[in-house]
Image (spheres, helix red, strand yellow):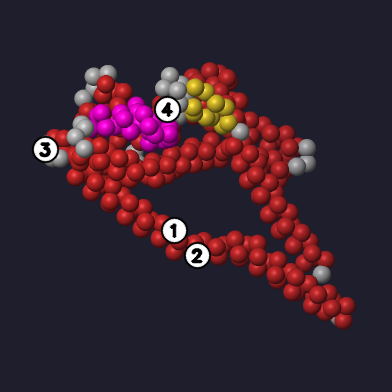
């Protein structure tokens, strides 16, 4: 009986520690530092990343080695996709990851020699995982915002173009009247590049290479092809808008169908053990008293 209680207590303690670590990471992801850019767009970096930025020059010479060149390039692309390309470079981000890894290692050894080995290991895992997890989450969130906003923007563009406006004037008027979001930031940047003299086809291709979101890529490639072939953009935008809306509905139905399967894991992890403990504990206690 005592062994069963010890095992249940250990499992409960492990679950509580995992939840506390998750809450700690979530709190740091919500605490953000704001900074205004030249485009008057507010971007945010997590506080935990911001804390280590002043120490980046101390390890920058290590990051500039050939061994980390691929990691720096991947981080640069991911930061650009997440909208942080103008706030922190890939080189600085890799340096921040290195500093956080070193800090986590020091804290782990300090807690290990202080008699808290498990807590030290969890803190090391947190410092090691957090930067990459935050960046992947930021990219996913930005892509989701673009996917949700794109059909409505295409509807407005198609209406404006069919009413007689050209593509650039329609895009400028729509961006001036919309709230600033991820799609608005990217389209406004592309519009400014075109106004500064860059060719429209080149600016649209740069947008595709910068964002790398599948729906936006398909739309921009269609617009580029229509521009090169001289096809009417109005009908093309309407067709693309309908296709993306149908695709979004299909994705929503797929996620709804996957919900029961995803619920099995939390039910098996949290609900079933509690039910078994409630049902079996009286039986085990009575059996232990009898034998």
- Say whether residue 28 is magenta: no
- Sequence-earlier tag: 1 or 2: 1
State the quadrant of the N terminus.
bottom right
- Sequence-earlier tag: 4 or 2: 4
Residue 261's mark? 2
- The crowd level at tag 3 (other Cα within 10 Å; few <14, some 14-19, many 20+) is few
Give me the C-alpha separation between circle 3 and circle 1.
Answer: 38 Å
- The crowd level at tag 1 (other Cα within 10 Å; few <14, some 14-19, many 20+) is few
Give me the C-alpha separation between circle 1 and circle 2.
Answer: 10 Å
At 55% from the left edge and 65% from the top edge, which residue is drawn?
Answer: 264
- The residue wearing badge 3 is 229
Question: Can you tell which of label 4 and label 1 is closer to the viewer?
Answer: 1
- The crowd level at tag 2 (other Cα within 10 Å; few <14, some 14-19, many 20+) is few
User: Most prominent secondary structure in the magenta stretch?
Assistant: helix
Instruction: Provide residue 120's location: percent of width, then percent of height.
Output: 69, 40
Instruction: State left or right for residue 60 relative to residue 8.
Output: left
At 42% from the left edge and 44% from the top edge, which residue is drawn?
Answer: 144
Give me the C-alpha separation between circle 4 and circle 2.
Answer: 37 Å
Question: Can you tell which of label 4 and label 3 is closer to the viewer?
Answer: 3
At 76% from the left edge and 59% from the top edge, which residue is drawn?
Answer: 9
- Sequence-earlier tag: 2 or 3: 3
Give me the C-alpha separation between circle 4 and circle 3.
Answer: 33 Å
Instruction: Provide residue 124's location: percent of width, then percent of height.
Output: 63, 39
Helix or strand or loop: what does disc 1 sit on? helix
Q: Can residue 156 be seen in this view?
A: yes
- The residue wearing badge 4 is 85
State the quadrant of the C terminus.
bottom right
Give me the C-alpha separation between circle 2 and circle 3.
Answer: 47 Å
- Sequence-earlier tag: 4 or 3: 4
Residue 255's mark? 1
């Amino acid at each position: 009986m005592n062994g069963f209680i010890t095992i249940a207590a250990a499992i409960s303690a492990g679950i509580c520690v995992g939840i506390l670590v998750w809450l700690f990471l979530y709190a740091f992801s919500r605490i953000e530092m704001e900074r205004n850019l030249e485009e008057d767009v507010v971007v945010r970096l997590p506080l935990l990343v911001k804390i280590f930025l002043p120490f980046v020059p101390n390890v920058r010479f290590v990051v500039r080695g050939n061994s980390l060149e691929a990691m720096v390039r991947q981080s640069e692309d991911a930061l650009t996709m997440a909208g942080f390309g103008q706030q922190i470079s890939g080189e600085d981000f890799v340096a921040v990851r290195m500093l956080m890894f070193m800090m986590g290692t020091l804290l782990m050894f300090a807690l290990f020699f202080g008699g808290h080995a498990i807590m030290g290991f969890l803190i090391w895992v947190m410092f090691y995982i957090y930067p990459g997890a935050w960046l992947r989450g930021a990219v996913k969130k930005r892509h989701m915002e673009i996917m949700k906003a794109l059909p409505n923007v295409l509807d407005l563009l198609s209406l404006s173009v069919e009413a007689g406006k050209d593509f650039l004037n329609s895009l400028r008027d729509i961006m001036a009247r919309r709230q600033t979001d991820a799609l608005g930031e990217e389209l406004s940047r592309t519009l400014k590049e075109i106004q500064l003299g860059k060719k429209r086809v080149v600016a649209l291709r740069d947008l595709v290479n910068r964002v790398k979101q599948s729906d936006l890529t398909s739309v921009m490639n269609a617009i580029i092809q229509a521009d090169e072939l001289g096809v009417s953009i109005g009908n093309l935008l309407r067709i693309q808008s309908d296709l993306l809306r149908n695709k979004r509905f299909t994705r929503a139905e797929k996620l709804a169908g996957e919900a029961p399967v995803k619920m099995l894991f939390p039910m098996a992890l949290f609900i079933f053990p509690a039910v078994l403990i409630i049902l079996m504990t009286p039986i085990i206690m009575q059996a232990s008293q009898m034998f």
